Image (cartoon, rainbow, N blue to C red):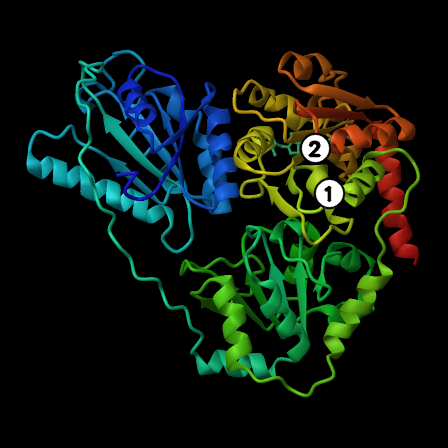
């Protein structure tokens, strides 16, 4: 059935209960199989594959805790809208909770974090077989229904498990679907658009190549509308404002009312900036339209007035089609744009996390795929401009630090060009098992910013004064990645100061490298915090 739905990528985790499934997948030339032993890593590896191909990817594991280890990736897939299909093998229902080995209640184990969860039967009749197929159709269907997301198929398998005598599987056909027609036909909403004088579109995380740029540019030209997006939205245009977090930081109290929108429209997934959330919650727009294929009320700014059941692309196309441009002077837009020009990226010359980020992003080759770790990395990256050809990925669905490396490894394994991962040290060492993976290719480049702990906690006012900070919150350490990286076949580079960083860049960017490269950049937490503070201090004084 996976073949019928063209789900080709299957990540296999070892086990005996799922050995019949492993045997089937691996012996069918249609499937491209990957092996990852650690299920937590396997889940994120599969997520990385799905990010690249923008199609469903399956991950298959054995029974018991193996399945629970897929939990973090399932949660991330749910909130990042990634079609991850979990296939778990199980003992027959009658043996669950009977002190038989490697069992726990698997059906429905991911609760509300999957779009569909099904429990198969061991089919004894044609009707049972019809039932199983119908359930699988539904699980696969939900992967891409409206918003993409994960599904779970739990398969009870009785012994004997290892009779591999069936040589050919029955053929199946997919159930066809008619694409949804998302049009904007509520005249009250169109009128609201026309009457609003301060329109703002805020775009959260979206996959690259989402096709929105042209329509957004046309909206910015035709209407007095401000468009805000972070790098993770993968929309690059001179009409879009990226440094809105810093702009808001800089605003004087008396300016806030002129910058706040009266009509706010949100598209896409999660937004990183806490400041924009605070800003929009404190000066609530009169109207907030939340655009999403899933008709669900998501009221991030406590001001929702409309849920538009449509995808982001249809929305921007429909606005262009249905609303005619007014003759207004674009006052609101030019206010934001001129402020944006005044807020420059950090220009520090001090060797620090920020300096490294600025240098690396400026030097990234065209069309690079960029995976960002959570914590300071994704925030610092946002402070710098990025070439329009760079695609950006980050696990912002639930902002966990446990799968950034595995996701990048999975992504790079199927991506044609160079894949860069910029990651902090706690995130890296947490997921270091990701390096123990036979699918790593020479196109992977990891920039590990090792500042000796969780830097982000040193930047949070209040927490940065706590006595528990160093030992228990930021978990200071002096671990280095060198030996780990080398033992996994990586070329290893390191830098403790500016010249070393600059001198290593050519090797880091070289497409000729025959091994993957890990570049460990060692910075000092106190210096980083100072540079960070002085950037924000300067913003207030411009
Ligand atoms: C799975 C998980 N556990 C804990 C956290 C809380 N957390 C957020 S940021 C962070 C520290 C990350 O440190 P590092 O990767 O070194 O990045 P830095 O802050 O130094 O840039 C932690 C532990 C989390 N986001 N995810």
Out of 503 and 183, give the one closest to the viewer. Answer: 503
Task: Specify whether residue 199 is in view.
Answer: no
Q: Residue at x 37, y 68 (%)?
A: 181
Q: Which residue: 62% across, 80% down?
A: 196
> Is 257 situated left or right of 133 in this image?
right
Quadrant for the N terminus in the image:
top left
Up/down of 178 relative to 233, above or below: below
Residue at image location 74% in from the left, 16% down from the top = 480
Quick check: which quadrant has ligand 1? top right
Q: Is the C terminus in the top left, top right, bottom left or bottom right quadrant?
A: bottom right
Identify residue for label 1: 365
Query: Residue 89 at what x, y percent from top left?
Result: 29, 24
- Residue 354 point in image, percent of width and height: 82, 39
Front in this rendered view, residue 26 or 280: 26
Q: Is residue 509 above or below residue 344?
A: above
* Residue shown at the point (72%, 38%) measured from the top left: 376
User: Does mark 2 have its CB less than 8 Å from ligand 1?
Assistant: no
| Count of numbered marks | 2
In the picture shown, does residue 319 fall above or below 503?
Answer: below
Q: Which residue is mark 2?
A: 511
Residue 449, percent from left and from top: 75, 29
Task: Give the percent coordinates (x, y) of residue 33.
Answer: 40, 27
Pointer 2 local density, CA inside 10 Å: few below 14, some 14–19, many at least 20: some
Mark 1 surroundings: few (<14), some (14-19) or many (≥20) residues within 10 A: some
From mark 2 to mark 1, how far is it between C-alphas? 10 Å
Q: Nearer the viewer, residue 268 or 163?
A: 163
């Amino acid at each position: 059935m996976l073949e019928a739905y063209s789900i080709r990528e299957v990540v296999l985790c070892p086990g005996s209960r799922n050995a019949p499934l492993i045997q089937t997948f691996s012996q069918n030339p249609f499937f491209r199989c990957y092996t990852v032993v650690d299920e937590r890593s396997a889940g994120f590896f599969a997520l990385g594959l799905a990010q690249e191909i923008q199609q469903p990817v399956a991950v298959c594991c054995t029974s018991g805790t193996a399945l629970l280890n897929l939990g973090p990736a399932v949660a991330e897939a749910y909130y990042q809208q990634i079609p991850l299909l979990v296939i778990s093998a199980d003992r027959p229902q009658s043996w669950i909770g009977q002190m038989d080995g490697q069992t726990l209640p698997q059906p429905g184990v991911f609760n509300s974090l999957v779009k569909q969860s099904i429990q198969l039967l061991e089919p004894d009749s044609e009707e049972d077989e019809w039932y199983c197929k119908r359930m699988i159709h539904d699980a696969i269907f939900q992967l891409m229904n409206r918003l993409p997301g994960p599904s779970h198929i739990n398969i009870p398998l009785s012994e004997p498990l290892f009779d591999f005598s069936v040589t050919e599987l029955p053929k199946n056909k997919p159930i066809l679907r008619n694409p949804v027609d998302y049009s904007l036909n509520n005249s009250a909403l169109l009128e609201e658009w026309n009457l609003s004088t301060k329109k703002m579109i805020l775009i959260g995380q979206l996959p690259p190549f989402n096709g929105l740029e042209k329509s957004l540019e046309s909206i910015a030209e035709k209407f007095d509308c401000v468009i805000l997006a972070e790098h993770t939205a993968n929309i690059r245009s001179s009409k879009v404002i990226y440094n809105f977090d810093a702009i808001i930081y800089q605003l004087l109290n008396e300016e806030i009312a002129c910058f706040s929108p009266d009509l706010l429209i949100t598209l896409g997934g999660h937004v990183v900036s806490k400041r924009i959330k605070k800003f929009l919650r404190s000066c609530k727009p009169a109207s907030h339209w939340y655009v999403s294929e899933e008709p669900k009320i998501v009221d991030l700014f406590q001001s929702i007035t409309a849920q538009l059941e449509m995808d982001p692309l249809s929305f921007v196309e429909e606005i262009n089609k249905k609303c005619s441009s007014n003759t207004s002077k674009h006052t609101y837009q030019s206010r934001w744009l001129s402020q944006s020009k005044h807020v420059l990226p950090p220009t520090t010359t001090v060797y620090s996390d920020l300096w490294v980020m600025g240098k690396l992003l400026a030097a990234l080759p065209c069309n690079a795929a960029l995976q960002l770790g959570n914590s300071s990395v994704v925030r610092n990256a946002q402070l710098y401009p990025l070439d329009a050809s760079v695609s950006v990925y980050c696990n912002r669905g639930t902002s966990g630090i446990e799968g950034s490396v595995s996701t990048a490894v999975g992504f790079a394994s199927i991506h044609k060009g160079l894949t860069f991962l910029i990651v902090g040290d706690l995130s890296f060492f947490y997921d270091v098992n990701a390096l123990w993976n036979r699918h790593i290719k020479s196109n992977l480049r990891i920039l590990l910013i090792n500042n000796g702990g969780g830097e982000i906690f040193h930047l949070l006012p209040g927490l940065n004064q706590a006595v528990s900070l160093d030992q228990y919150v930021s978990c200071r350490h002096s671990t280095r990645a060198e030996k780990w990286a080398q033992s996994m076949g990586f070329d290893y580079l390191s830098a403790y100061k500016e010249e070393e960083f600059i001198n290593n860049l050519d090797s880091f960017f070289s497409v000729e490298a025959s091994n993957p490269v890990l570049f460990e950049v060692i910075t000092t937490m106190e210096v980083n915090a100072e540079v960070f503070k002085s950037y924000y201090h300067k913003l207030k004084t411009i």
